[in-house]
Image (tube, coloured by chain):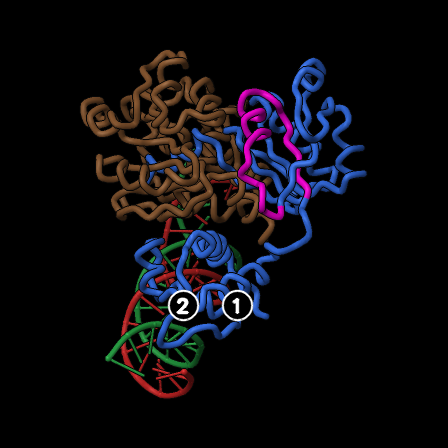
Chain colours: A brown, B blue, C green, D red
Amino acid sequence: MKAIPGPSKRRLVLLERLLSGCGKKTITSVEIEALTGCSSAVIRKDISLLDVCCGASNGYKIAELKAAIVKALNLTQERQKCCIVGLGKLGQALLESTELESSPFQIVAGFDSNVNRTEVLRSVFPLHPTTMLESVIKTEHIKYAILTVPQEEAQGTAQKLSSCGIKGIVNFTSCVLTVPKKTAVENVSLLTSLETLSAN
Amino acid sequence: MKAIPGPSKRRLVLLERLLSGCGKKTITSVEIEALTGCSSAVIRKDISLLDVCCGASNGYKIAELKAAIVKALNLTQERQKCCIVGLGKLGQALLESTELESSPFQIVAGFDSNVNRTEVLRSVFPLHPTTMLESVIKTEHIKYAILTVPQEEAQGTAQKLSSCGIKGIVNFTSCVLTVPKKTAVENVSLLTSLETLSAN
DNA sequence: ATTTGTGAACAGTTTCACAGCG
DNA sequence: CGCTGTGAAACTGTTCACAAAT
């Protein structure tokens, strides 16, 4: 199969989500355009990259299309382990979130540099002091990290995560993280997002 | 001034942040490459879009460069008002966050469909039941919304926000929002971000 | 000498238009 | 006959390479 270009990947991730929350059996590229704002042509091109053939004249068969995206993007993989680093208000909120239930992602550990906090907080998975970062990540084979530490700790922690072999960081801090290319970063801070909207 | 293309805008937003947290006086495009992972050529091209001329032989003068970006992206504007819609754990955490301090963005209202919650929670700005959405947004001239409602309410709320004239939504839910093009959406949900990382 | 700023070449995306399929 | 799937065209963004600037 051909490699799927970056912009297409991002759209396909959203498309898969859209299909999941859609009661119907089939859907046409024009309907998808109405729902997502992406042109029907771009949608068809994206789908053609999956080399499935799940639609003609009546639109795409949703079940097949969804399966094809999941397969192409590895969304189906065995549980992929994540950890939360930084257990302030935001970290705690994410810790308790049910968003990842019924997704392939599973949070298996939390870290905070404040030992008190890791002892006082309760969660279904263990919480550790940040000094344990490397050993836990390596023994648990954790792939992704959710970064919710304070500004001052962001860059240092990111670097440590990268050198522990973390594949990707979801960066909730407003710091620009400098990490080796092998570690992908997804910036999702409130401030960055507002600035991006504002710059439109 | 020429229009600044989308990818450049995103990089410039991050570059501005980088410059802010950088003690030095000048910086070269190669140094920026090391810090951000973007090639020096792309950095220079981005900066050339700003039509400033703030560097040669010794790199860019950080103060001037920062000012130019701020100006080009409207980051300097008068306070831009935001609201939080959905005061669950995540909404509360953002409510209490100090991230927007010393930014042009200011949260001026919170909403929740549960009236109890808007009465029990305390914050420096007023909290309202969601029924007040339209009137508050219009009288306060709120530009951006931070969406942290439960899944089921996401699409309906987004539509309402759009029809109230909201310019942009920071979408912390994992729903794909269908809104008119005049309303920009920035997707920052944990699940979407992890999927994007995983699809790399 | 070093680094920007930029036109020109290149690469990657999106749009277009239509043949082919159900 | 409507809709997909896809080459070819158009466009947008990136890299290259070097002249200009200090």
Asked if C14 appears above or below A85 in the picture, the reply is below
Look at label 1 and name its amino acid. Answer: Leu
Residue B30 in picture, x, y percent from top left? 31, 64
Q: Residue at x 60, y 36 (%)?
A: B178
- Residue at 60% across, 27% down: B154
Residues indicated by labels 2 and 1 sit on the same polypeptide chain = yes
In the rendered view, does A24 fall on the left or right side of B122? left
The circle drawn on residue B50 is 1
Q: Which residues are magenta?
A: B81-104
Amino acid type shown at disc 2: Arg
Q: Residue at x 32, y 61 (%)?
A: B31
**Looking at the image, is A53 positioned above or below residue A89?**
below
Question: Can I make out residue A160 in this image?
Answer: yes
Badge number at residue B44: 2
State which tag comes first along the sequence, 2 or 1. 2
Q: Residue at x 45, y 64 (%)?
A: B62
Q: Which numbered dot is residue B187?
A: none
Crowding at dot 2, Cα within 10 Å, few <14 / some 14-19 / many 20+, comes out as some
Q: Are marks 2 and 1 in contact (CB under 8 Å)?
A: no
